[in-house]
Image (cartoon, helix red, strand yellow):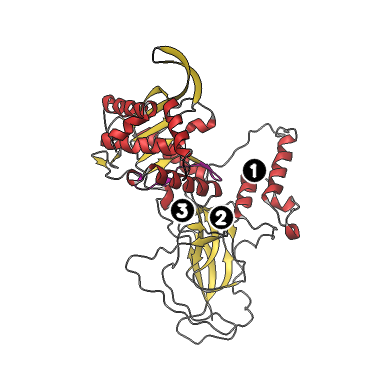
Amino acid sequence: MPVVREFKLPDLGEGLTGAEVVRWMVEVGEVIAVDQPVVEVETAKAVVEVPCPYGGVVTARYGEPGEEIAVGAPLVTVAVAPSDGPVLPGEPAEQVERPLVGYGVAETGKGGRRRRVGVPAVGAAAPVAVATAPAVPAPAPVLRSGPAAPAVVPVISPLVRRLAREQGVDLAGLTGSGPDGLIMRADVDRAVAAKAAAPAAPAPDGREEVVPLRGLRKAVAEKLSRSRREIPDATCWVDADATELMALRRQLNATPGPKVSVLALLARICTVALGRFPELNSSVTEDGSAIVRHSAVHLGFAAQGERGLVVPVVRDAHARTTEQLGEELGRLTASARDGSLSLAELTGGTFTLNNYGVFGVDGSTPILNHPEAAMLGVGRIIAKPWVHEGALAVREVVQLSFTFDHRVCDGGTAGGFLRFVADCVERPGTLLRQL
């Protein structure tokens, strides 16, 4: 007789305690192979395909799309053939229980489909070959516990499902404009627009709407709250004349080669400034007893993506040229927009560059990205009256703000860093002395 195995949501790393079901990739009663992805879940960091280490017949699955599952809670149960007897007609082949092979963060390939990146356990043996039985009709499931399979909705993209869920759109009530009635993102956008245009009706009992705090929003809330609790931060700021920096960018982009963004120039300035003020490329230990100064600059930057504001990390930014920084910033920004950033690309930062000027604002006092010790904020660059060489002129001006952990340095160090950055913005030739 088949043995029913229960597969629980594995530890997804990075201290994550749960994940939200995005879509099921198998149905109850379906025959699956060892290490076949069974569900796509969304953590606070990325979208992940979870493979099941058992092969056999899916007898139950737990959790609906949009529901959060805790690490260690059941995901699916699978009826598998026993390992010490012959394979009966119509039953799955012999099973070898082993660690999850190929488990990892979903990445996007050229065709836009997600694939799993293998992360084998340390010291794990090579995958064991598993014999397969002749193709036969799948037997009736042994168990039928758990929720019933949801109705099939003609939508493929998990991003469309997520958008609908976040906007409160019922996909079952939409008529798709794609091939064979496939629901496209444009269909969800139209439904959202129609919903916004309709007059808002107050709740009959006068109660306010309660929105669950989960997924990325929950992770951001927890991290920022921890930053505020643990880090005694302070902020200083200065206005800088960015006219010469913008002129330099125009000169660079007038020559053949990759285009250089303002963000890439500011990133290069930051890496040089951190070389002069290494105290700011650091973090305080968990128990607060020591300061860890990092030898490499892993530069995080704020980017708006499908899942909200995220902070991708440019690894070893100090070792990259301005063009190389620009290329990596562009690649990570594109990945943030389509939701394909991996966990590795979202963790391990040592310093953050926050360009909030793209939102049309001048200044900000941001919360530090725990456990980092410093963040440079950049406002919009806008034409303003400015005294230049003793005369009033219209110049391109930017406000720079610098937030730092007061435990790692005093105000003199923070002010020196910010002043150096401002001098490089106003006189880009200053960088030549440092390169």
For residue 108: magenta?
no
* Picture residue at 75% right of the left edge, 53% below the top: 177
Q: Position of residue 63 (x, y in %)?
A: 57, 57
Query: What residue occupies the far top of the structure in this picture?
Result: 391
Q: Nearer the viewer, residue 196 or 256?
A: 256
Q: Amino acid at mark 1?
A: Gln
Q: Where residue 18 appears, x then y in whole percent?
A: 48, 52
Q: Do residues under tags 1 and 3 come within 8 Å of each other at their CB atoms? A: no
Of discs 2 and 3, which sits in the foreground?
3
Q: Nearer the viewer, residue 228 or 81?
A: 228
The residue stretch that appears in magenta = 304-317
- Residue at 39 percent of width and 42 percent of height: 322
Position of residue 208 relative to residue 334, above or below, is above
Going by the numbered disc 2, the residue's amino acid type is: Val
Which mark, residue 342?
3
Q: Where is residue 36 drawn, in percent x and y?
A: 52, 69
- Which disc number belongs to residue 167? 1
Kindly report which numbered mark, 1 or 3, lies closer to the viewer in this rendering: 3
User: Which residue is pictured at 71% across the width and 57% down the height?
Assistant: 182
Label 3 sits on what residue type? Ser
Q: Nearer the viewer, residue 80 or 129?
A: 129
Direction front: furthest residue: 255
Instruction: Find numbered disc 2 in the image and state the secondary structure of the residue it sits on.
Output: strand
Earlier-in-chain disc, 1 versus 3: 1
Residue at the spot of label 2: 21
When asked about the image quadrant of residue 378, the answer is: top left
